[in-house]
Image (tube, rainbow, N blue to C red):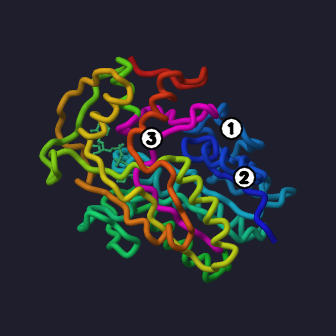
Amino acid sequence: MPTRSILLCGGAGYIGSHMAHWLAEHGYRVTVLDNLSTGHRDAVRWGELILADLLDPAALDQAFGGRRFDAVMHFCARSLVGESVSQPNAYYANNVAGTLNLLDAMHRHQVGKLVFSSTAAVFGNPCSDCIDEEHDKQPINPYGASKLMTERILSDAAHAYGIRSVALRYFNAAGALPEHGIGEAHRPETHLIPNVLRAALGQGPALKVFGDDYPTRDGTCIRDYVHVQDLAQAHGLALHYMDRADGAHAFNLGNGQGFSVREVIDCARQVSGRPIPYDQAPRRAGDPATLVAASGKARELLGWQPRWTELAPIIDSAWRWHRAPPHWFPALPA
Ligand code: UFG
């Protein structure tokens, strides 16, 4: 039976809201479940919103009862690396125990397919500059550990309950779809591109570049930036993949090209036409020098074809979003 009705957990967040847009555009029925702890009610523009927390099994039962879902997409997570080091219990509770509750509810209500948001943080400090799925997984913080544990749980759930799953390990999610009223709106904002653009707009505290003594071409960290719309496309393809493949699977998602922090700043300067002042700062704890994905498996088995393969258009989409944010965009710190 074709997969048409999707429960989108975390659909009020950054990547989840782009997923909702993609699903609606491709003819799926979307129901968003979110506790709005970091997501935004106004970002739920496609489908009904169920206000519920994965840590509340009764609320999950209520969400699943009376509705028929063909698959679940799971974007709910705490995802700040530094915070995970200072508040590990919150990360294991939300990211691991929350997913266990979700799997229980899926099992009870006979929903057999899950697409799960995983992360490059499962690899820890990689020993290769281009990371494929087989690379060693030694997370260096509770955030990465919580995601790797969940991947393991998904593999056990496939075996025990027959729940099919695809874990998608994002490298650096970036960009926005301002023409559809969605984009990145985190508070606090820790990510590079929004902070760079805020500096271009002359807003908030000065931009800091964390570390200039990494073993990279200019001493700053190198990352693989992938547009959220391309991530959404991969999730859509994962639904089809689960129609033909049982078990639990994992794919790395990135463009395969790394950019240093300074290259991102230079590119944003060109895109915005504005100066971008910054202060050089010490290294940020937990940052690996280089994270670049080898995404051949996703291309081959899912048929994934990222459309945003250049950095400038990715930054330009984020620039258009930050330059003219919607009324609900959270207030910037002074
Ligand atoms: N950076 C700065 N200044 C800033 C923000 C970031 O110099 O104001 C640097 C960081 O130190 C890092 C690079 O820019 O070198 C990218 O940082 P981001 O915070 O944008 O992204 P991360 O690579 O730290 O994080 C991403 C995901 C996480 C995931 C992690 C895996 O957002 O969810 O990759 O390492 F856990």
Q: Amino acid at mark 3?
A: Ile
Q: Quadrant of residue 291?
A: bottom left
Mark 1 CB in 8 Å range of ligand 1?
no
Q: Quadrant of the C terminus?
A: top left
Q: Secondary structure at mark 1?
A: loop
Magenta span of residues = 164-193
User: Which one is in front, 101 or 267?
Assistant: 267
Q: Residue furthest right?
A: 66
Q: Secondary structure at mark 3?
A: helix
Q: Residue furthest bottom?
A: 159
Q: How many marks?
A: 3
Q: Position of residue 1 (x, y in %)?
A: 81, 71
Q: Which residue is mark 2?
A: 26
Q: Which residue is mark 1?
A: 44
Q: Position of residue 160 (x, y in %)?
A: 63, 82
Q: Secondary structure at mark 2?
A: loop
